Amino acid sequence: MKLHFEYSLAGFRSCVMDDGAIELAPSSTWSDDAWFADQDARRLEESSGWWVLQEGEAEGTTVGGNLCTFNLLQGTPYMPSLEGAVVFVEDDDQVRPWDFDRDLVSLLQQPGFSGVRGLVVGRFQRATGMTRDLLAQIVPDPVVLPQLLTMDELAERLGVTHRHVRRLVAERRVPFLRVGRLVRFDPAKIAAWLDSRRVPEAPI
């Protein structure tokens, strides 16, 4: 890359060549053009800074990468431990918000994700159609979500069919949560719901 590589290069050098702590700051500009097509005619976009969805502090080992590629490691010996990690993910311009939603939920359901200490998401290219509001809907509390139940898991616990659970949701006869486009169930709410439906024993 011929022009406008200074920010990335400085960050790379800090990571691999410096011994001290690294203090990061958002770049004042970013690029969404085909930089390889004409490197002398680049177009920069003004940066609005980082989007902070959940404030806090975290410390841990950084893992991650391209989310779609990272998810391909699931179920293999090469999937790194997520326990105590700060997870960094990003995706390309081929991804749409619903794709990112699905891929992120797949990662959130992995063993050990409840021990993740932070989640950092890379900037989305304009072609993805991602907005701050959409991202806020998609990214849940990373500690809470892995404890939630899917429709299949609830059906298994209740000893009923997936179709029956879908009908309960459609008729709003069971407590549920919307996580993006997905339906999830809080085990505590389900336990209370079941308790409220308990039939008292008949007197002897």
Image: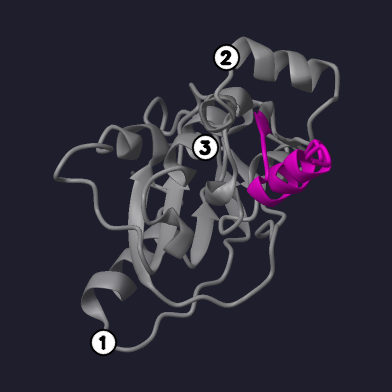
Q: Closer to the observer: label 1 or label 3?
A: 3
Mark 2 crowd level (few <14, some 14–19, many ≥20, 10 Å Cα): few
Q: Position of residue 103 (x, y in %)?
A: 47, 32
Q: Quadrant of residue 11?
A: bottom left
Q: Closer to the observer: label 3 or label 2?
A: 2
Q: Is residue 10 visible?
A: no
Q: Is 20 a magenta residue?
A: no
Q: Position of residue 178 (x, y in %)?
A: 74, 34
Q: Closer to the observer: label 1 or label 2?
A: 2
Q: Amino acid at mark 1?
A: Asp
Contact? badges 3 and 2 (CB < 8 Å): no
Q: Which mark is residue 110?
A: none
Provide the residue designation for mark 3: 105
Q: In this rendering, is residue 46 above or below 184?
A: below
Which structural element holds mark 1?
loop
Pick out the residue farthest to the bottom. 20
Q: Quadrant of residue 115?
A: bottom left
Earlier sequence position, callout 3 versus callout 2: 3
Q: Position of residue 88 (x, y in %)?
A: 43, 54
Q: Is 201 a magenta residue?
A: yes
Q: Which mark is residue 19?
A: 1
Residue drawn at x 67%, y 20% as measured from the top left: 165
Contact? badges 1 and 2 (CB < 8 Å): no
| Magenta segment | 183-204
Q: Is residue 111 visible?
A: yes
Provide the residue designation for mark 2: 161
Pick out the residue farthest to the top. 163
Mark 1 crowd level (few <14, some 14–19, many ≥20, 10 Å Cα): few
